[in-house]
Amino acid sequence: MKIFVLGPAGCGKSSFVKYFSRYLSELDLDVRCVNLDPASNPIYDADKDIRDFVRTEQIMKIHRLGINGALLKSMDESLRYVEKMRTEGDYVLIDTPGQMEVFIYSKSGREIIDRLAGRDSIGLFLIDSSLIDDPESFLSVILQNVVVSLRLSIATATILTKSDIKDIDVEGMRRSIVERKDTLAELLERTSDFIEYTTLSQRIVKVSNPKMEGYHDVYSLVNEMFCTCGDVS
C-alpha cells in the first residue's frame, strides 16, 4: 500500500512519516519511507531520497533562482529520477514536498504522483489543528483536502495533527455550521454539502506525534479505505 502524505508547510508531514513508520514497524510490518522533498533532509531513515539526485539549494545557486523558482525547477528535475524512487513494502510512506502548492499544482508534481501511484494508493491530507479556530477555518482546510483529492485522483483522508497542542471538536464545528444564522450561514452550509458530495464518507482522525497518539486510528482508517465493506463514516 502506498500512502502519500500531503499537506501545507508546517503541518507535520515529516514527523508523521517518522512516527507512523515506527508504529507500523512495531506491528512487524515491512515499512518503507520515501522522501520526495528536494528542499529538506528527512528526519527519518529514508529508503529512497530524492535529495540523492536533486537538491533545491544547489538549483538556486546554479540557475540563480529564488526559492519558488528553484522549487519549480526541482520538480522538473525530479521527474528524471522518479523511477529510482520506487520501492516495495507492506506500507510505503511517501513524504511529499513542504510547499504543497508548488508540488500539487505544477505539471511535474502531478506527473510524479501519477507515475508513482497505483491502485493500491491513497493520500493522507494533514492539517495543523492549531490553525483551526472557527467553522470558517475548519471548512477552509477541509476544502483544501477536496481540491487535492480531485487534483491527484486518489482517495484522500483528513488527519488533524498536533492534537496535543489543540484538540478540535469536529462534531461541534459541524453543529455550529448548521446552527449559524448570519449572512455566511448559507455559504458555509453549501460548502459543507459540496464537501460531502465530493469526498469519501470518512471520519477525521486526530494524531499527536510526540505522544504517539492516534496512530492506531490512522492504521484502521487506511485499511478501511481499501475495504468495500469498511465503515469510514
Image: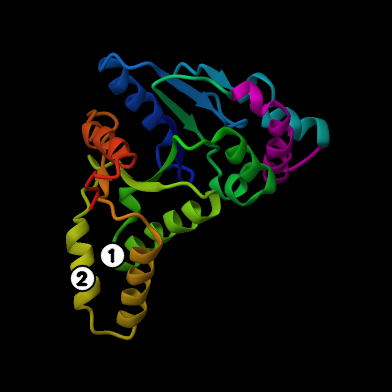
211, above or below 205, in the image: above
Q: Main secondary structure of the magenta part?
A: helix
Q: Residue at x 65, y 25 (%)?
A: 83
Residues under numbered marks 1 and 2 in contact, where contact means CB atoms less than 8 Å apart: yes
Three-letter amino acid code at disc 2? Ser
6, above or below 19, in the image: below
* Element type at mark 2: helix
**In the image as oriented, which residue stretches furthest toward the right?**
63
Residue 111 placement (x, y as % from top left): 65, 42
Three-letter amino acid code at disc 1? Asp
How packed mark 1 is, by other alpha carbons closer than 10 Å (few <14, some 14-19, many 20 or more), is few
Whether residue 97 sits left or right of residue 203 in the image: it is right
Quarter containing the N terminus: top left
Whether residue 114 sits left or right of residue 147 in the image: it is right
| Residue tagged 2 | 176
Which of the two discs, 1 and 2, sits closer to the camera? 2
Residue 24 placement (x, y as % from top left): 30, 22
Magenta region: 64-85
Q: How is the image coloured?
A: rainbow
* Element type at mark 1: loop
195, above or below 10, in the image: below
Q: Residue at x 33, y 71 (%)?
A: 193
Residue 31 placement (x, y as % from top left): 39, 19
| Residue tagged 1 | 134
Q: Observer-nearest residue: 217 or 177? A: 217
Q: Residue at x 50, y 18 (%)?
A: 46
- Residue 62 image-quadrant placement: top right
- Residue 161 image-quadrant placement: top left
As for residue 194 lying within the magenta part, the answer is no
How packed mark 2 is, by other alpha carbons closer than 10 Å (few <14, some 14-19, many 20 or more), is some
Residue 123, label in figure: none
